[in-house]
Image (spheres, grey):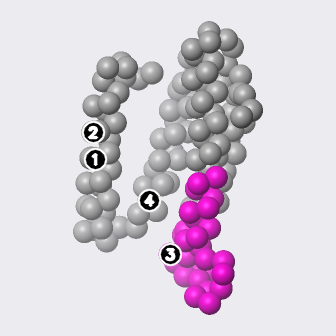
């Protein structure tokens, strides 16, 4: 990984604090929080492309997760900009955001679990089914 195992907890805490501060600064500057998700997708794709240069890995689960996250982002933006906002409807952009991002997280977990399993077993990087 990018960080030694003994530094990972400190890096995680630092990222959490930085993210929390970023959200508050965005709120004060009246910036939309959806930019964080777009930036996160970009960072994930760049880091995966860089990691792929070191060791090729299957993209299946991660691709599905990123696609679902893009759908979630689009639904959130449609709700935010009021392009699709029906207060009386059972289908709400914000609700679609939560469902799609949760399913995207499931596929991301499958992707990273497969990498972790392959790393500890010393096997080739292959994705496993649950």
Question: Magenta segment, which residues?
Answer: 74-103
Marks 3 and 2, Cα distance to the nearest angstrom?
30 Å
> On the image, numbered disc 2 is attached to which residue?
14
Q: Secondary structure at mark 4?
A: helix
Whether residues under marks 1 and 3 lie with C-beta atoms below 8 angstroms apart, the answer is no
Question: Relative to 58, does residue 96 appear above or below in the rendering?
Answer: below
> On the image, numbered disc 1 is attached to which residue?
18
- Frontmost residue, 71 versus 98: 98
Q: Residue furthest front?
A: 130
Q: Residue at x 47, y 41 (%)?
A: 43
> On the image, numbered disc 4 is attached to which residue?
35
Residue 83 counted in the magenta span: yes
Query: Of tags 3 and 2, which is closer to the observer?
Result: 2
Classify the position of the N terminus by image quarter: top left
Q: Secondary structure at mark 1?
A: helix
Marks 2 and 1, Cα distance to the nearest angstrom?
6 Å
Whether residues under marks 4 and 1 lie with C-beta atoms below 8 angstroms apart, the answer is no
Sequence-first tag of 4 and 3 = 4
Q: Left or right: 44 with respect to 13?
A: right
The location of residue 59, given as percent across then percent down, is 68, 33
The location of residue 117, given as percent across then percent down, is 61, 21
Marks 2 and 4, Cα distance to the nearest angstrom?
20 Å
Whether residues under marks 2 and 1 lie with C-beta atoms below 8 angstroms apart, the answer is yes
Classify the position of the C terminus by image quarter: top right
> On the image, numbered disc 3 is attached to which residue?
80
């Amino acid at each position: 990984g990018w960080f030694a195992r003994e530094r990972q907890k400190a890096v995680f805490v630092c990222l959490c604090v930085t993210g929390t501060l970023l959200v508050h600064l965005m709120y004060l500057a009246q910036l939309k929080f959806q930019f964080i998700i777009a930036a996160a997708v970009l960072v994930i794709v760049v880091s995966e492309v860089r990691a792929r240069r070191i060791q090729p890995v299957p993209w299946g689960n991660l691709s599905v997760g990123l696609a679902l996250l893009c759908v979630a982002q689009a639904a959130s933006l449609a709700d935010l900009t009021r392009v699709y906002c029906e207060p009386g409807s059972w289908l709400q952009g914000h609700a679609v955001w939560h469902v799609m991002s949760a399913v995207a997280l499931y596929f991301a977990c499958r992707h990273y679990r497969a990498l972790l399993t392959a790393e500890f077993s010393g096997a080739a990087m292959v994705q496993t089914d649950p």
